[in-house]
Image (cartoon, rainbow, N blue to C red):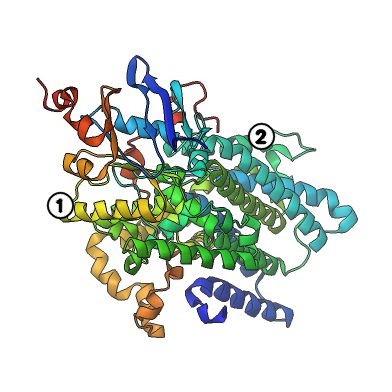
Amino acid sequence: MMFKKFNLNHYINYIVIGILTVVLSVITMTGGRLDSSLLFLLEKIAISIILAVSLSLVVGFLGELSLGHAGFMCVGAYIGGKVAALLEDSLGNGLPTFLIALLVGGGVAAVCGIIIGIPALRLRGDYLAIVTLAFGEIVKSLFQNTSDETFGGALGLPTPRFDKKYLFIIAFVLVLITLAVVQNFIRSKHGRAVTAIRDNEIAARASGINVTKYKLLAFTLSATFAGIAGVLYSFSNYTVQSAKFGYNYSIEILVMVVLGGMGSINGSIIAAALITFLNTKLATVLTGDLAVLQNLLYALILIVIVIYNNAPALKSFRDRYSLSVLWKKLIRRKHDPATHKDDEAKWDVVPTKIEMNEVLSIDVVPPEAKGNTGNGGDD
Amino acid sequence: MADYILETKDLGISFGGLKAAQNVNIRIKKNQIYGLIGPNGAGKTTVFNLLTGVYKPTAGTFYLDGEELKGLPQDKINHKGIARTFQNIRLFNNMTVVRNVMVGLHDQPEFKCSVLETILRLPRHFKVEKAMRERAKELLRIFDLEEERNNLACNLPYGKQRKLEIARALATNPKLLLLDEPAAGMNPHETEDLVKTIRFIRDNFDMTILLIEHDMKFVAGLCDEITVLNFGTVLAEGDTKTALNDPEVIKAYIGG
């Protein structure tokens, strides 16, 4: 019965990433030599995908702007790296250490998610964005100003690099787990509640949705996976330096989500892989005097992609040649009314922008914004 | 036990010095269709916002089926049995029609399923999802929306959006349904249809309905009893004909 409803579109991202992982694993296992810089790039891509998918939960599905995602990652990287450094002598730097570090790093990041989620219940839009931005910077400065013995201070925390070559396999398994958790969450009644809050918070409350609970849940889940990405980062590098986790990096993650189309998980994955690849290539190709061109080129490419995706003048061109159209032609799927009836396929339908007029045209002022009585928003 | 499904006692709210509503006493019997009318700015929607917990009353209190609900947050009040629609339609525009209704079903006890169960895709998740979809389809069938169930809510024509909003409110299984200007912007044909729908809801869902409306013909034809508000206070109340013919009410509407 379950197989009858099998919807390829739902599982395409698992399948593609799964096959990719298996093929690359087989190549390494059978003694094929993969360039270590390629392995490093794969690890970086996996980290970016986890970050983008988890941020997409908050930005794309909850509809709140978060600019502090790198902050959660920073927490995961430092805590996970520290745990690994402590365990290195007794357990080595293999899988057991990694798993423990993962649990601790992810857990601490989750706690931070709750802490930042609580103001998120009272703030919205730009104000929340500012709070998350500040959170990211605070975390960064905190770790920067620790003593050399605890978290390495300004020099960074030396972390044990994972001892085997197959870290990228673990990284991609983590990508699959992230995908499974985030997608299963979104494609459930709970995810429906979250998107309802995004679409119309007042109506969601009136329909009996516990807005507090779901906002906090989305924030915490998102932060946990950012923390996991951080732990992965600490195992993929020899040092964790706080300077890496500035707001620039948060915005880079946000760019991945926006570029991929808000509310589209697959889009986030592709954008994350693309941007990471682009950044790494630009950094290796443009060396010496040309290094100054890195950011310029990166920005130019981003501008071109955004214009291509959104310019009305290019619409007819997109309708003919966009990837999704080509894909549909490739597998020759007809618009079968029977399959169209199945509304399972419409989980991810969202506009590419958060509609500000929707946010601003509130006919009833929520009690917490107004404070008419003392017992306003303490629900 | 309670004689009235909804009973407000001197309900009121003031914003600073402005008394948006004061001493509002409304008593609605079970299965009544009750009208709340008044000129613009009379405080009708304010009363709705008080009853649904958007505002906390600064004076008085109100009871649903004998239970005091004053001060509860909006979602709790909904769980206790008050559902509403909005003056300017508030749907989940980027979700399909069927999912809009399923959001309304979210907290029904028979559709309980924890976050962990859905993430791990345990059997209960599939069972609950299927049952919710079936129930939502049933509701949509009543409102003649089943064909449109996979369209985005924002793509529905106006009259159907109104109906969908009512369907979503009914999905929360309320004891009392609040309709804020359900006939606003409708043509005579749609209004007629709406009257039938509201009667149908009352009879088949065993529902009590409180509605705000400006269309006097609509109110006179549909409501058993009404309360007339003006400047936040009750001007007249009682059975529809008497209250509408009250000289004070005519004066408030026509002036002079």
Is residue A367 depicted above or below B199 in this figure? above
Quadrant of the snapshot with the C terminus of chain B: top left
Work out which residue is located at the far left of the displayed protein and give it: B256
Residue A171, quarter of the rendered image: bottom right
Residue B48, quarter of the rendered image: top left
Q: Chain of mark 2?
A: A
> What element does badge 2 sit on?
helix
Is residue A23 depicted above or below A129 in this figure? below
| Amino acid type at image mark 1 | Pro
| Point 41% across, 31% down: residue | B50
Residue carrying label 1: B188
Number of the label disc, if any, that sits on residue A142: 2
Residue A235, quarter of the rendered image: bottom right
Asked whether disc 1 touches disc 2, contact meaning CB atoms under 8 Å apart, the reply is no
| Point 44% across, 54% down: residue | B171
Front in this rendered view, residue A142 or B217: B217
Horizontal side of A311 relative to A23 (left or right) equals left
| Amino acid type at image mark 2 | Leu
Q: Position of residue A164 (x, y in %)?
A: 77, 67
| Point 31% across, 59% down: residue | A310
